[in-house]
Image (spheres, rainbow, N blue to C red):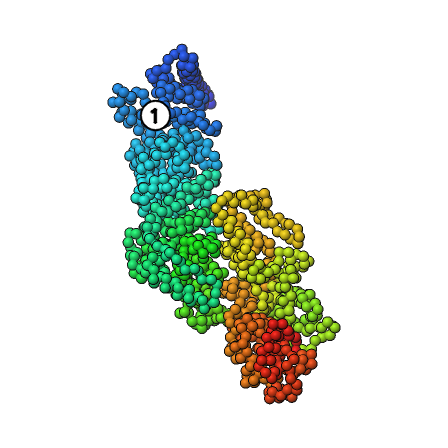
Amino acid sequence: MFSVPQSAKSEFLDKARQAREERRGHKDKEKSAIHIQALVRRFLCRCRLQKQIRKEVDDYFQASETGTSKRNALSIFKIARKLLFVYCQEDKMRFEKLCRAILASMEVENEPKPDILQDNKLVTLYLTMLVTFTDTSTWRIVRGKGEALRPALTRICENIMGHLNQKGFYSILQILLTNGLARTKPSLSKGTLTAIFSLSLRPVIAAHFSDNLLRSFLLHIMSVPAIVSHLNVLTPEVKSLPSTHDLLRKFILFLSREEQCLDICVCLEGSHTLCLLGNLIHLGFLNEKVLEEEANHFVKDLTDMLSYCQRYVSQKKSNLTHWHPVLGWFSQTVDYGLNESMPLVTKQLQYLWGVSVIRTLFSDVLSKKLESQEHTPPPPQPSTSQNNLPVKNLFKRAFQKSASVRNILKPVGGKRVDSAEVQKVCSICVLYQTALSTLTQIRLQILTGLTHLDELLPKLWAFICELGPQGGLKLFMECLNNDTEESKQLLAMLMLFCDCSRHLITILDDIEVYEEQTSFKIEELLTISSFLNTFVYKMIWDGILENAKGEKLELFHSVHGWLMVLYERDCRRRFTPDDHWLRKDLKPSLLFQELEKGKRRAQLLLQYIPHVIPHKNRVLLFRNIVTKEKESLGLVETSSASPHVTHITIRRSRMLEDGYDQLRRLPANSIKGVIRVKFVNDLGVDEAGIDQDGVFKEFLEEIIKKVFNPALNLFRTTSGNERLYPSPTSYIHENHLQLFEFVGKMLGKAIYEGIVVDVPFASFFLSQVLGHHHSTFYSSIDELPSLDSEFYKNLTSIKRYDGDVGDLGLTLSYDEDVMGQLVCHELIPGGKTMPVINENKISYIHLMAHFRMHTQIKEQTGAFIRGFRSIINPEWLHMFSTPEVQRLVSGDNAEIDLDDLKKHTVYYGGFHSSHRVIIWLWDILSSDFTAEERAMFLKFVTSCSRPPLLGFAYLKPPFSIRCVEVSDDQDTGDTLGSVLRGFFTIRKKEPGGRLPTSSTCFNLLKLPNYSKKSILRDKLRYAISMNTGFELS
């Protein structure tokens, strides 16, 4: 009866719970309100305190400025504590005033003063503060009686420096230095730079040059672009800081430990590593004594750093590479912000190949004495083998008689390769070779620097010749088969010598090489070329090149490049005896067998050094290549098929025009094939005769004679030796480029068929046809004498002009008289307004030579080459030098071999080898005629004054002599009666009034049956001098 309903109980409990929650909520609100009030009161209190402190600080500085209050150290200390307690960004001005007050109280001297507008005054102020509080020497308190406090105060300064270092002090200084110096015009004042460098050095000195601090200093300070260069222009006190503390030696020794050097390189990217290198090299240049004493470690450090950079140097652009102005394509991240400072860094790097450092590093090599003979024999002039031998003997006698001559004609050996001297020179060569392969964009600067000392390369060659027990060559061949570090260093020395020597000979002109004999004597070049020739030959023939990779492949290209520069200069102007380049131990028959089998070494030999094979063997190989192509194209008569024949009809009065119209549109393979010519005379009647190659030969000769006639103005002749090259004014012909292409095809056809034509080309033009002008080592100035020797002398006289070239009034332009009008050609855009001065005179010379030989005739030469190469594959001619290609075109320049001609002569009309007229003829040619007259005779019967390269066995058609009874217009050919009369020397009538005639298209001499030898001699001499004949029989 007293029970309470369940619903009422639940309501009661809910109300109780709600009441508790309300009470708890009120309590939380009260607590939150109290907490908020506390925070607000604390904030307001802090604000009031900060405001009060700032007001106190402001009042203090205002009173100090007005002079109503005197500053003292204690008052500044109290104010400083208060300001630093409340310091934030808005207090920068107050902090600046505080710093100034502190410095004023300490009577600081030598405060840096900004002398560049961009200098930040705050930076200067803060630097002064740091300079002051890291060194007690300027503190007034330690003067006089306070000296006893110095050790304790110094310890405080060291603690400050330690604290700064922990807070990234060096990183901040690096940013400050880089921002101020890594630009075209530095924005840091001398005073600011002095302060920063002094600050950066103090922790290192305080830590007694510990490894940790040296590492930080190298990473952050010495890697700043050209900091040593900037310091070098300051006061002597700052300039001498590095040397005073012997910094360079400490840096060198620190980096000489491989793991520490690697650590530094890994922490620095490419540009900063270069900056560190530049600063170290500059320090070495300034501290020659330290460099001399620590040369080995210095060289090792630089080599290691360059080698690390070399890992990331790439030969070509890719998605993973970045362009660097010194390193080229680089696969590490590049700091492009440093690019502005790279010219100054490059200038520092240049000290490494400057005269001073080279003299210091190569002191062992340069100390070697090489006495020159007083009377150096003159270099041999271009000549035949008859006067080359005396020159060679003259050299030998001179070297045997005189002890004062450079005794380095052949390797002598004797120097141990493991000696300290050799190891040092090798490591130096490795350094420079590494620099050449790493600093790709300034490679030419390095080579020019290394070749600046005339004595270095000859003495380095002498050093190389003394290595090993038997001298250079054998030692280096052994090194190729070894993979030891010692072998690599020796090969690097050879490679450096080759690279530098090649560069030197490339930039020297003929006067410097032959007359003045700058750096190398001619006899030294003979020995070096022999060494290089043998070295390259053995690398190829012994199979080393086939498997060569990396450094060995680079070595081969270096040695081969130097060899080919010497060979090409010898081709232009001989300095070697006959057969100097040939390998006597190489049998051409074996080489040809291996070529047939596709042996790699034979192919490489033909590709790289074809000159070791006798010239006639190479011509034979060329003819075999042409024959094989003819067979593959179906151009040779076989039992099962006949080649396609192209028939053309040519009017004698318009031979060039008809030939051009009918042949220019033919495909190359048709021109390579059989072409039959039918001539039409002036009356429009077909001429008698069947073309069995003879008529086409006459057509080809006549075409070539016409197009190369300077009167046509397609080609001009050079001054002096009358050699042909494209005329710059050939554009007067409407279709001149098509004509040049046609001429190229016709000359190619002549070579293709083995028809020699008497067309003497200028060697510079043939070099372009062969593609030599695309070579890295090609120099236009070297080829200029073949165009105009007088012009060449005038240009080289500008090079040697001792005064101010600007006084000559030249500009970078060329004035030419073109058909009565003066035309100005600018060598570069705007060249006619740019004066030639001493700084650009070398460029002017090369630009002028390039313009005369290339730019002026670029289109004509290009058209000629297109036509020529459509018939002759350019790869076929790679085995020939420029003079050899001229011989391929015009035949051999040797004496005519009458015995060979007699052996391959065919007789007609009753003549035979024992016929008295024939006996008289050969006797007259050998005994009565001069060499010049014999050449005229050969031209009379074959249209070319030179014999075929492979002898008269290869003259097509073969040389023949026919007995004739009547004049050419009555001649109907041989009959039985005429043959019998010729054979038995029976005459219808005395032929004394008639001259010998010829048909050059058939290489045929038509000879009357003269009764006396004297008549034959006189008539023949008259005929060849008047150049009569040349008719189709």
What x and y, as percent, mark residue 812? 56, 46
Q: Is residue 1018 above or below residue 975?
A: above
Asked where in the image residue 492 lies, by quadrant, the reply is bottom left
In the rendered view, would you say 997 is above or below 459? Answer: below
Considering every residue shown, the one lying at the far left of the view is: 148
- Which is nearer the eye, 377 or 861? 377
> Could you tell me which quadrant the N terminus lies in?
top left
Q: Quadrant of residue 415?
A: bottom left
Please report the residue visible at 38 percent of the width from the left and 31 percent of the height from the top: 235
The image shows residue 344 at horizontal and vertical percentages of 44, 40
Q: Say which quarter of the image contains residue 575.
A: bottom left
Residue lying farthest to the front in this orientation: 1014
Q: Is residue 851 left or right of residue 270?
A: right
Q: Is the C terminus in the top left, top right, bottom left or bottom right quadrant?
A: bottom right
Q: Where does label 1 land, which residue?
A: 133
Q: Label 1 amino acid? A: Phe
- Residue 622 visible in the shown view: no
Which SS class for mark 1? helix
Mark 1, residues whose alpha carbon is within 10 Å: few (<14), some, or many (≥20)? Answer: many
Q: Residue at x 40, y 69 (%)?
A: 585
